[in-house]
Image (cartoon, helix red, strand yellow):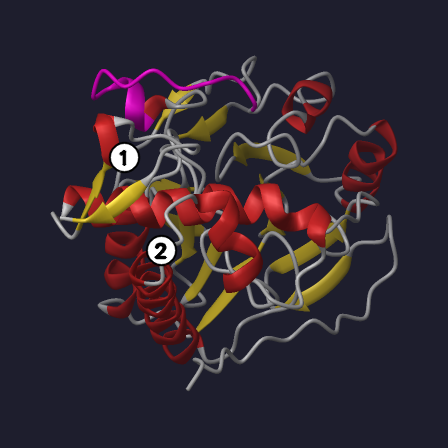
């Protein structure tokens, strides 16, 4: 039986308008809807007076102006970035034209892999380099708010969540979303790291998640547990394909993602490759001819 993931895709909002979504939390959604962003990038504003901005979003002047309008009469003191995909961090450069607030993030694109000597292909925001690099457990304090940094690599190697301590609210970026699973795309994406990062969240006491795309997640642990089971189910599907003689990832995808539009197959293939890579690392599968790549052939070890 397939894992039932309690997705929630409905969201009432108006583009360019700041909405108070919880005490001390506002959100402005950028008009960049897509199959990968749902309705668009949700930029969060924490606190009052001296505020933090989480994920300024794409390099969209209209969206940056909407953020500035929302904080008119206030001061942006911190800019927090969950990761460096193009719908999250490029807006920093535009926002920095209006504030001298420093940016906080784990590091530039691929930082978590570069530390291990693994080169990362371009595809993210290669221009972003935070003013302040943060690590797991660091505390960032503002006027009437404070956040704990929660390092959650997997979707990207530099992915950082931010926990608003006054509200037991976790801003989860793309690590956990309520409308879709996250794409894990090697080499920067890493399935082992992603699953470890999901397990990390189960040990926390956050009461609500605010992802960068989509609505609040009000039963976070149930969703995280479903995501872990979903990934195990994908592994079982891969092994079934192998046992049926389907050894190439591009041939597995139509069998594993029935009902998914074909234009999503390349992204799905990246996530399947991440799962295959994880199975190889654990000694469950092996790559024929040592070709551990998206176009390789795989078999039981």
Tell me if residue 116 is in the magenta stretch. yes
Q: Is residue 227 above or below residue 124?
A: below
The answer to the question of whether label 1 and label 2 lie on touching residues, with beta carbons closer than 8 A, is no
- Residue 31: image x %, image y %? 84, 45
Of tags 1 and 2, the one toward the viewer is 2
Circle 2 is placed at which residue position?
A: 245
Image quadrant of residue 202?
A: bottom left
On whether residue 232 falls in the magenta region, the answer is: no
Q: Residue furthest bottom?
A: 1
Q: Which residues are magenta?
A: 112-123
Question: Residue at the location (47% across, 54% down)?
Answer: 252
Q: Is residue 62 above or below residue 238?
A: above
**Who's the residue at 65% across and 67% down the image?**
215
The picture places residue 278, in percent across and down from the top left corner, at 25, 46
* Residue 137 drawn at (x, y percent): 24, 45
| Label 2 residue SS | loop
Looking at the image, residue 196 sits to the left or right of residue 237; the answer is left
**Mark 2 closeness class: few <14, some 14–19, many ≥20 residues within 10 Å:** few
Q: Is residue 115 left or right of residue 176?
A: left
Number of marks present in the image shown: 2
Residue 290 vertical position relative to residue 257 in the rendered view, above or below = above
- Residue under numbered circle 1: 135
> Of the residues under marks 1 and 2, which one precedes in the sequence?
1
Say which of 1 and 167 sits in front.
Answer: 1
Q: Which mark is residue 260?
A: none
Q: CA distance from mark 1 to mark 2?
A: 44 Å
Image quadrant assignment for residue 206 = bottom left
Under tag 1, what secondary structure?
A: loop
Residue for point 61% across, 59% down = 25
Q: Is residue 272 above or below residue 235?
A: above
The quadrant of the image that shows the N terminus is: bottom left
């Amino acid at each position: 039986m397939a894992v039932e993931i309690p997705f929630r895709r409905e969201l009432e909002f108006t583009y360019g308008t700041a909405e108070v979504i919880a005490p001390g939390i506002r959100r402005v959604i950028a008009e960049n809807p897509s199959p990968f962003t749902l309705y668009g990038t949700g930029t969060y504003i924490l606190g009052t007076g001296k505020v933090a901005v989480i994920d300024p979003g794409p390099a969209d002047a209209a969206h940056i102006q909407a953020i500035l309008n929302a904080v008119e009469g206030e001061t942006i003191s911190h800019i927090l970035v969950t990761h460096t995909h193009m719908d999250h961090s490029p807006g920093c450069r535009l926002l920095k034209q209006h504030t001298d607030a420093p940016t906080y993030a784990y590091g530039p694109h691929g930082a978590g892999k570069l530390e291990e000597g693994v080169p990362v292909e371009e595809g993210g925001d290669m221009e972003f380099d935070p003013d302040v690099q943060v690590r797991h457990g660091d505390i960032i304090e503002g006027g009437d708010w404070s956040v704990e940094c929660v390092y959650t690599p997997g979707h990207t190697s530099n992915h950082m969540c931010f926990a608003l301590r006054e509200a037991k609210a976790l801003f989860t970026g793309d690590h956990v979303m309520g409308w879709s699973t996250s794409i894990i795309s090697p080499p920067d994406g890493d399935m082992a790291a992603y699953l470890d990062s999901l397990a990390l969240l189960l040990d926390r006491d956050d009461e609500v998640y605010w992802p960068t795309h989509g609505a609040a997640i009000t039963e976070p642990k149930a969703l995280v547990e479903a995501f872990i089971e979903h990934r195990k189910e994908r592994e079982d599907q891969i092994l079934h394909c192998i046992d049926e003689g389907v050894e190439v990832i591009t041939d597995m995808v139509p069998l594993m993602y029935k009902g998914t539009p074909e234009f999503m197959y390349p992204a799905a293939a990246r996530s399947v490759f991440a799962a295959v890579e994880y199975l190889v690392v654990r000694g469950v599968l092996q790559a024929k001819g040592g070709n551990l790549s998206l176009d390789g052939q795989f078999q039981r070890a």
